[in-house]
């Protein structure tokens, strides 16, 4: 703990020296991140394979390519982000100018998650660096190969005086949370998020919490067979090809009309075979479950007899420990229809390759179904019904809404990514990442030549009348009152 406090004190001193504020430092660190990703792709593929069994194509799509894109976007826009913005003032503010000046927050802590251990570590660093902060990254200990990779490589490519990686488990995390930070950015479960927020409250530290929840997908009856096939393909891709469903914005369950579900289930079976073959485990296109705890948690969801009775498509789930990989095992993509709504699989975030389908009498009932549950991080709806789309936007609340696709909002630098309510606090990506790690300071300048004499005591009804006109921007009233051409209303106060 003493060594940690000394290390953080040195980082604060380095930040106070102004080094991290320079545009040249920010650009150098962002370019260092680019170089790290370009020069170590093979090793990144290997560590993601070891921790999560990810195929290189999935690893590049979700973690390497997406962060390269984000870094390039930050480099292209950094000058504009750093620039002060002139603030518009009312005419009554004579000889006064004002500006909004962005300044870094200071020393920030980034705690990343295990499901996208490279991408979710680097993505918030991009914003923190672009904003000019010094920072500590705490990678997830549940992805040890990726954590070790980041701890070894980041000091080789970035300024270790201002950017450090500290590895460790819950004890280290607890020690870090006891320290004073200027910002904490956390990605993970809601349970740990509450611990982070409670610790931050002791120092009044602002937090960004990127959590998750049960993200629904409304699948309306689509008249075109092409539209139906594309919709099912996109649903399955969003559920099973993103870390085997271990993704906070992945589809958690489907809502569909009862009369349409048999068609939907049959098409899902066909598309699963197309995507993953007869034996998905051998396709290397479905990632592995991160560890024994999460494997048994998922197995427990299915062990409920009432839930097991709702399974319509699966093969035997297998534990597949491997001497060369630290990820624990494999679970077959599993489809269920109408598991009990009070069961754990419908109460808790699934975070795995299990996809419940909930049937409704009318697709419009999906709105009330979603409203009756905690606000999701993302809401997906596959429909061509304009009226339904309008109702979804106006009558539901979620971090984001996507129509006729899924996950694409995460890749858009011009869209904020973040939750609401139980699914998170704050937003990032693109300029929003810069904003999340920035304080926008109000700066104003006044001339000594002109003053508003009536803003100082002693008070009288004449000055009261001038205040009224000024706050209503009634400039003619100000002039008439100053010239005594308009009599002030008497004050009602005794």
Image (cartoon, rainbow, N blue to C red):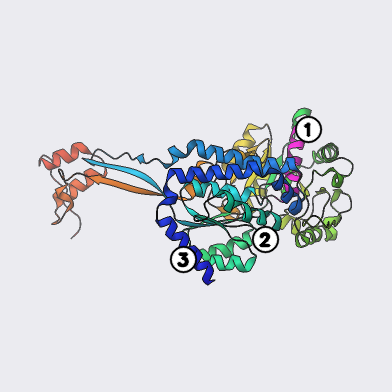
Q: Mark 2 points at which residue?
A: 141
**Name of the residue lying farthest toward the front:** 156
Can residue 489 be seen in the rendering of this structure? yes
Is 260 above or below relative to 311?
Answer: above
- In the image, which disc is placed on residue 493? none
SS assignment at label 1: helix
Q: Spatial distance from mark 2 to mark 3, Cα to Cα?
A: 25 Å
Q: In which quarter of the image is the N terminus?
A: bottom right
> Crowdedness of circle 2 by 10 Å Cα count: few (<14), some, many (20+)?
some
Q: Mark 3 points at which residue?
A: 203
Q: Quadrant of the C terminus?
A: bottom left
SS assignment at label 3: loop
Which quadrant would residue 297 be assigned to in this image? bottom right
**Name of the residue lying farthest toward the left:** 484
> Crowdedness of circle 1 by 10 Å Cα count: few (<14), some, many (20+)?
some
| Magenta segment | 229-247
- Residue shown at 47%/59% (left/top)? 11
Label 2 close to label 1 by CB (< 8 Å): no
> Is residue 258 inside the magenta stretch?
no
**Name of the residue lying farthest toward the bottom:** 2
Q: Nearest the camera: 257 or 381?
A: 381
- Measuring from the top left, give residue 71's x and y in whole percent: 56, 41
């Amino acid at each position: 703990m003493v060594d940690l406090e000394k290390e953080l004190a040195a980082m604060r001193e380095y930040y106070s020296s102004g080094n991290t504020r320079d545009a040249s430092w920010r650009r150098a660190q962002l370019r260092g991140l680019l170089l790290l990703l370009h020069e170590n792709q093979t090793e990144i593929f290997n560590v993601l394979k070891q921790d999560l069994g990810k195929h290189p194509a999935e690893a590049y799509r979700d973690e390497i390519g997406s962060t390269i894109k984000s870094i390039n976007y930050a480099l292209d826009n950094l000058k504009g982000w750093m620039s002060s913005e002139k603030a518009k003032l009312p005419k009554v503010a004579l000889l006064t100018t004002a500006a909004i000046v962005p300044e870094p927050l200071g020393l920030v802590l980034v705690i990343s998650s295990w499901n996208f251990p490279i991408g979710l570590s680097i993505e918030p660093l991009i914003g923190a660096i672009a904003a000019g902060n010094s920072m500590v990254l705490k990678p997830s200990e549940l992805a040890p190969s990726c954590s070790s990779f980041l701890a070894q490589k980041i000091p080789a490519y970035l300024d270790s005086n201002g950017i450090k990686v500290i590895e460790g488990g819950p004890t280290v995390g607890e020690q870090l949370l006891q320290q004073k930070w200027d910002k904490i950015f956390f990605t993970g479960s809601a349970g740990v998020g509450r611990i982070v927020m409670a610790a931050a409250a002791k120092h009044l530290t602002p937090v960004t919490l990127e959590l998750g929840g049960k993200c629904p997908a409304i699948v309306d009856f689509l008249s075109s067979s092409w539209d139906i096939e594309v919709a099912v393909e996109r649903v399955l891709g969003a559920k099973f090809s993103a870390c085997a469903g271990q993704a906070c914005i992945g589809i958690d369950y489907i809502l569909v009309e009862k009369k349409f579900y048999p068609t939907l289930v049959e098409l899902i079976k066909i598309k699963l075979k197309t995507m993953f073959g007869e034996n998905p485990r051998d396709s290397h296109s479905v990632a592995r479950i991160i560890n024994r705890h999460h494997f048994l948690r998922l197995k427990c969801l299915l062990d409920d007899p009432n839930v097991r009775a709702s399974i319509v498509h699966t093969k035997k789930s297998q534990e597949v420990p491997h001497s060369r990989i630290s990820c624990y095992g494999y679970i077959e993509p599993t489809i269920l229809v109408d598991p009990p709504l009070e069961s754990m699989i419908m109460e808790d975030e699934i975070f795995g390759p299990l996809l419940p389908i909930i049937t409704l009498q009318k697709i419009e009932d999906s709105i009330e179904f979603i409203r009756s549950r905690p606000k999701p991080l993302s809401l997906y709806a596959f429909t061509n019904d304009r009226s339904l789309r309008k109702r979804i936007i106006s009558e539901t609340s979620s971090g984001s809404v996507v129509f006729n696709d899924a996950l694409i909002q995460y890749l858009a630098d011009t869209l904020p990514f973040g939750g609401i309510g139980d699914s998170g606090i704050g937003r990032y990506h693109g300029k929003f990442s810069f904003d999340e790690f920035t304080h926008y300071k109000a700066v104003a300048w006044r001339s000594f030549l002109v003053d508003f004499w009536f803003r100082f005591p002693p008070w009288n009804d004449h000055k009261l009348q001038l205040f009224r006109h000024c706050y209503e921007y009634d400039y003619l009233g100000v002039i008439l009152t100053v010239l005594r051409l308009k009599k002030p209303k008497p004050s009602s106060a005794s």
